[in-house]
Every structure is written in structure tokens, then in C-alpha cells.
Amino acid sequence: MVRCHISSDLKDMALAMSLQGLPDSEIHEYTEISERSLMQLWSTYCRIGALSQEPVSTGRPWTLTSMEVKVCHTPFDTNRYLTIHI
């Protein structure tokens, strides 16, 4: 099992082939996209109407500690450590 990025052009081509009625096994022969990935691609397309889903935000999810939450929710003018002096 190899995980690799599938370009959007290749995804478009695979979807077009699928819409024309080609079976997944033939699409796999032409594009080298696994049949499982083709099923996931089709599922994503049916669910959101696009071939790939853009992330809501980039980067790693961040879990804040209770202290960080308290600092983040404190207004800037009352927290002397976060006030910017120009």
C-alpha cells in the first residue's frame, strides 16, 4: 500500500472516466489510482460536490490549556503582558 498525492487534474480525469461509465478496474489501469481511492474520490464528490475538500484552517490543531484560554480571552488593554507599546 502506497500513499501518494493525487493531482487535481488526475482526479478530474478519473471522475470524467467514471461518469462515462468506465469500471473502476479500467480507470485504475489508465490512471494507476487504486480502486479504493476511486471509491473515496466518488464519495467525496457526492458528499460535497467537489473532488477535494479544502481544510478549514491550515496548520496543526492546537489544544489550549486552561491558562492559555484565560490569557486569550482577556482583553488586550487589561492584560499588561499582551499590550503593545509603540
Image: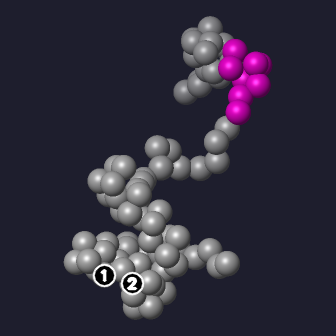
Residue in front for this viewpoint, 78 or 57 = 57
User: Relative to 79, is 33 above or below?
Assistant: below
Local secondary structure at mark 2: helix
* Residue occupying the point 44% across, 71% down: 38
Residue sticking out furthest to the left:
20
* Residue occupying the point 50% across, 70% down: 37
Position of 73 with respect to 41 (left or right) is: right
* Residue occupying the point 52% across, 70% down: 36
Question: In the image, what residue type sits under mark 1?
Answer: Leu
* Residue occupying the point 59% across, 24% down: 85
Residue, disc 1: 22
Position of 46 with respect to 35 (left or right) is: left
Q: Quadrant of residue 23?
A: bottom left
Residue in front for this viewpoint, 51 or 75 = 51
Local secondary structure at mark 1: loop
Residue 41 colored magenta? no
Position of 12 with respect to 68 (left or right) is: left
Distance of label 1 from label 2 (alpha carbons): 7 Å
Q: Can you tell which of label 1 and label 2 is closer to the viewer?
A: 1
Residue, disc 2: 27
For the record, the magenta segment spans 63-70
Residue 68, x across and y down, in percent: 72, 23
Residue 56, x across and y down, in percent: 46, 44
Residue 15, x across and y down, in percent: 31, 72
Disc sitting over residue 56 in the figure: none
Q: Label 2 near label 1: C-beta < 8 Å?
A: yes
Residue sticking out furthest to the bottom:
30
Whether residue 12 can be seen here:
no
Q: Quadrant of residue 64?
A: top right
Residue in front for this viewpoint, 3 or 73 = 3
Question: In the image, what residue type sits under mark 2?
Answer: Ile
Sequence order check, earlier mark of 1 and 2: 1
